Every structure is written in structure tokens, then in C-alpha cells.
Amino acid sequence: MAYAKLINEMWNLNQRTVAPSMFKRILGEYNPTFAGFGQHDSHECINTILDLMGEDLYRKGKKPYVEQNEAEGQSDEQAAKEAWNKHLLRNESIMTDLFHGQFKGTVCCSQCDRVSVTFDPMMTLSLPIPKPKHEKTFFFLPYKIGPDYVNTSYKIKVGESDNMRTLRSTMMDNYGLETGSYVVSTVYNNNFARLHASSANLLDVSNE
């Protein structure tokens, strides 16, 4: 009811701003994390709201007890369908229809090599914010230089966490240079100043 009142005020009242005071107070009553006037995590707030609305909009009466099983001897399609049907027994609502999905979880025991596969419900996905990449120029000098030699330059986009392994893999994919057929060095005053290990950060190397 508080959520419906808030939506009505946002869309139907001719006001430039709406203060969700009632909704904020009631949300804090159901989840003390959001009581008071401190700053809170917006992702956790959205999850809490969707969970509470899902409880209110549950289509059946009393929720049955459901035991979650591992997907032993079943195909992924069968196991996923069975896990989803069990999830619906306790969470069947329009919120589930609109916002819920499944994760496939696979755990392998390092001692006995037993593999456990489960299909777990999820409501939101946490994705990393992509970091910008910078275009850097690298020069390739062949070991043997003939009369028709031409200095070759390659432009590669480099991220903050990329290392020499990334460079070698990119050079192989983009230009066909075998990963172990060359060394990487910083050149200073026409001399090879320093050879770089596979773990060296590409941005640090390219800025030298």
C-alpha cells in the first residue's frame, strides 16, 4: 500500500518533487537496516523492496516446505526445471515472473573430485564497471634484418590490469605472432634497457 501510494504521487500529482516519507518509514519497519537517515546501499534497497512485494503478492496460501536437491544423474535442462518448480512453490508471484532467474553453480571437491551442481534462484546480477583501455604502440624488431627490412609498429588497447601475457595473446590473435617467439624490452637511447617478465603490467611498461 505504501509503494502504491508513492507511485500514485509520482505519476498523478502535479508536483515537481515527491518526498517518499511514508514509504521510507515503513521500509525501515520491515528492514531495520533502512531505518534512520543514514546512507544505504541502493542495490540492497531494491532487493529488499522486491522481496517484500513478492511476499505480499504471493499467489497461494501457506508456503510448503521444499527441500533443495543436487542435480545428480539429471541433464541441466531437467535439473533446472525441477529447481525452478520448487522455487515457484514458495515464491510464485508476479515479482518472480518479472525479476527472478537462475544461476547454475558447479563446485568440484579437490579431495575426491566429486562435482556438485545446483540451480539457484537469483534476482539481480552484479556486473563490474568496465575500465577504459588506452591505445599503445609497440614496435617489432626481427632478429635478422635484411635489406628489405621495414620497422613494424602495432597498436594495442591496454587495460589497467593487463600484463605481458595479455600482450602476447593479443599479438597472436591479431597479428599471428607466436607467443614465445620474441622478447619484450624497453628501448632507451637506441639500446635495450630492460627485458620484461610475463607478469609485468603493460601500462607501466608502455609508459617507460
Image (cartoon, rainbow, N blue to C red):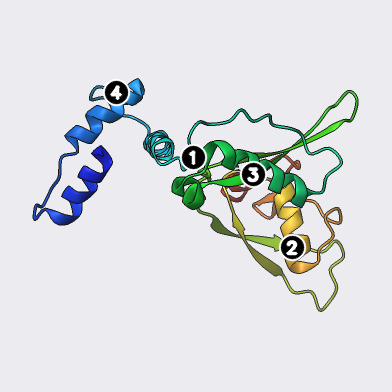
Q: Contact (CB < 8 A) between labels 3 and 1?
A: no
Q: Between 113 and 26, which is closer to the camera in this rendering?
A: 26
- Label 4 – label 1 distance at C-alpha: 25 Å
Q: Amino acid at mark 2?
A: Phe
- Label 3 – label 1 distance at C-alpha: 14 Å
Query: Which x, y percent locates residue 199?
Result: 72, 39
The residue at 68%/55% (across/down) is 190
Query: Which x, y percent locates residue 193?
Result: 70, 45
Q: Is residue 157 visible?
A: yes
Q: Between 124 and 139, which is closer to the camera in this rendering?
A: 124
- Label 2 – label 1 distance at C-alpha: 68 Å
> Disc 2 marks which residue?
140
> Disc 3 marks which residue?
85
Q: Which label belongs to residue 60? A: 1
Q: Earlier in the sequence, mark 4 or mark 1?
A: 4
- Label 2 – label 4 distance at C-alpha: 65 Å
The residue at 19%/50% (across/down) is 8
> Disc 4 marks which residue?
29
Q: In the figure, is residue 17 to the left or right of 207?
A: left
Q: Amino acid at mark 1?
A: Lys
Q: Amino acid at mark 3?
A: Asn
